[in-house]
Image (spheres, coloured by chain):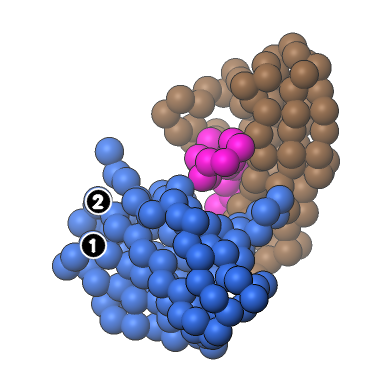
Amino acid sequence: SAVISQKPSRDICQRGTSLTIQCQVDSQVTMMFWYRQQPGQSLTLIATANQGSEATYESGFVIDKFPISRPNLTFSTLTVSNMSPEDSSIYLCSVEEMGYEQYFGPGTRLTVT
Amino acid sequence: QKEVEQNSGPLSVPEGAIASLNCTYSDRVSQSFFWYRQYSGKSPELIMSIYSNGDKEDGRFTAQLNKASQYVSLLIRDSQPSDSATYLCAVNSEGSQGNLIFGKGTKLSVKP
């Protein structure tokens, strides 16, 4: 499976600021995804990021709050904008391979104070 | 609303026993089914995928799928303390890319 890295691995941010999370894959992939995992909860899909097109957002997530870029087939960024303590969470990127299998990056642990 | 249900646990088994984890899903047209293992503080790791009715074995892990009952399970034989983790069931509906729905996970504890 693809090797996925994320930066930063963790961060503590102040309310009202923005953070951009990077996801790098060691091979070209068509489908990349961004998830959120709030403390003690399961994974919630934020959006699907396809190269060359606008990201597709799930219900409850909007582009103004979570802008996504996908400039090429190995890289994507997710920005968490105008952060509040409710945005404290783990943010995960994933890639899809054969048979709809998804593989996850190590995650970014975000704390908003 | 498409749902994936799991018993949250914790499920506690002694070392060497068989751990049985269960998952039900609501969408009858679901086609692909996955089990992820997540250690505390780590990201989910794919351990099994299953697409057709029946059993699929990989080492100490066996996934079982029954589409008629909308039920998928994971058996872990000869459980080890290192198997202690949260196990997430995920279902892909309609064969569409990216449309994975996750259950809330079952926490497994294997006691030495």
What is the chain identity of the residue bearing mark 2?
B
As for residue A19 lying within the magenta part, the answer is no
- Image point 67% across, 72% down: which residue? B82
**To which residue does mark 1 refer?**
B70
Q: Are marks 2 and 1 in contact (CB under 8 Å)?
A: yes
Q: Main secondary structure of the magenta part?
A: strand
Which chain corresponds to the colour blue?
Answer: B
Badge 2 local density, few (<14 within 10 Å), some, or many (20+)?
A: some
Name of the residue lying farthest toward the top: A16
Mark 2: secondary structure = loop
Looking at the rendering, which quadrant does residue A83 occupy? top right
Q: Nearer the viewer, residue A51 or B91?
A: B91
Residue A72 image point, x, y percent: 70, 48
Badge 1 local density, few (<14 within 10 Å), some, or many (20+)?
A: some
Q: Nearer the viewer, residue A99 or A60?
A: A60
Tell me what hue chain A is rendered in. Answer: brown
**To which residue does mark 2 refer?**
B26
